Image: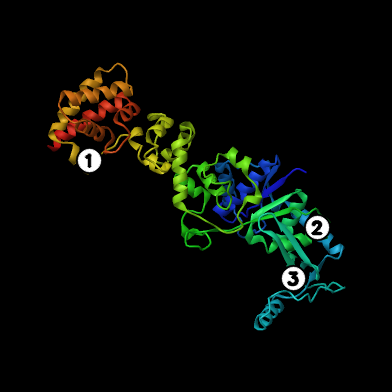
Amino acid sequence: MTVRTRFAPSPTGYLHVGGARTALFSWLYARKHGGRFILRIEDTDLERSTQASVDAILEGMEWLGLSYDEGPFYQTQHFGRYKEVIQQLLDQGDAYRCYCSKDELEQLRAEQTANKEKPRYNGKCRHLSEPQPGKEFVVRFKNPVGGAVVIDDLVKGEITISNQELDDLIIARTDGSPTYNLTVVVDDMDMNVTHVIRGDDHINNTPRQINILQALGAQLPLYAHLPMILGSDGARLSKRHGAVSVMQFRDEGYLPEALLNYLVRLGWSHGDQEIFSVSEMIEHFELAAINPSAASFNMDKLLWLNHHYIMNGDPEHVGKHLVWHLERHGLNIAQGPEPANVVAAQRERCKTLVEMAQSSLYFYRDFHQYDDKAAKKNFTADAAQVLANLHDEFVKLPAWETGPLHEVVLKLAETMNLGLGKVAQPLRVAVCGTSASPAIDVTLALLGREKTLARIHKAINFIYSTN
């Protein structure tokens, strides 16, 4: 049997954290077993589905690197097939037309609520033998009245739900359009999905879908319901807890592999291991190792992971992601050092790429003012001579490299009988505009000869004009 999993989001918003984890687990299981991973867009909610949401889902999947083998498939392109299956269920007596009006159903619900009964359809039209021309109707699935549905859930264990708890759900609306539980069943059946991995908010849907699948004589998939993700306050994760959109994490400077590593550990573990490459995730992932209890989202842990990947990732790879953030500042990357070299220089100091980009602006464009506190402390009258001497020595250098640059700074401090900080700090403020940067020799090497000399000259003029 070829394992076939699917991720089936509704395009009514962005790709959120819970959806991304579901996609990741489904993707990992397919990759682990040499199977196929399918992307299906469940866009039958025509009022709420938008192309912008579709684009956000596709963008999120691409950014995370969760490549799909089939799709994306769109449910709105399969209405003919759904209509065919609805008619099949009607023909074989497993569905029926319900002519109850909205007012009748609301009255029924009110009576049941008043009697402290579970609101449900009472089956009034279940045994009608003749159609009622001219009256609007929905189509309901004729749920079995006896027995129970037993789900051998691959995460939560055996779940048993009595059929008496399930009413006859609507599978086609008055306009003939199919409902969620019908479309999901048909798609899973037609796509030969073997494993349905999804959030445990779908547990109530699963027995209904199993009954429809059995009525259609279809092979049942195996089900794995993932525990919900909670915020730090124990409530279900929502917008008020901060970043819940996948692309918001990108915007805030996280690397995709950091988010993947964090998501895979939300409810799944492999011993005490915390850091996983994607290949290690695939190698070790098992549904049986998922904790059925809810997982808690911890932003501090994600930030720690992000810094780990910035520190230990290939600078070329991290640099490609840094470029996106640099360009958001309107920078021309061609007018500065290679981003990979900036990553190597800055990564110890920066936990996010937003922070790294903000700290690296002076590499790519000139600044128009100095940090006020840094200038007051370091741009003394004596600093002008220090900078002038540095300028003269830098001009003589045949090679603009960290070793010779370091030697110039070191020797000048000795010659002028100054502490290294009295030389390096005025130089740093002169070329960066601030008192914080990577090692001064690294900073100068990344800036290049032309920018360094021009900025030193500018700083000397500034000091003379203000002292």
Q: 155 and 35: which one is in front?
A: 155
Q: Are marks 1 and 3 in contact (CB under 8 Å)?
A: no
Residue type at numbered disc 2 = Val
Classify the position of the C terminus by image quarter: top left
Q: Is disc 3 surrounded by few (<14), some (14 to 19) or many (20+) residues within 10 Å?
A: some
**Can you identify the residue that label 2 sits on?**
85
Count of numbered labels shown in the rendering: 3
Q: Could you tell me which residue is drawn at 66 percent across and 58 percent down? A: 156
Foreground disc of the pair 2, 1: 1
Q: Position of residue 253 (x, y in %)?
A: 44, 44
Q: Are marks 2 and 1 in contact (CB under 8 Å)?
A: no
**Local SS, label 1:** helix
From where the camera sits, is residue 86 visible?
yes
**Local SS, label 3:** loop
Q: Is disc 2 surrounded by few (<14), some (14 to 19) or many (20+) residues within 10 Å?
A: some
Q: Is residue 257 left or right of residue 426?
A: right
Establish if 153 lies above or below 249.
below
Q: Which mark is residue 167?
A: 3
Q: Which mark is residue 374?
A: 1
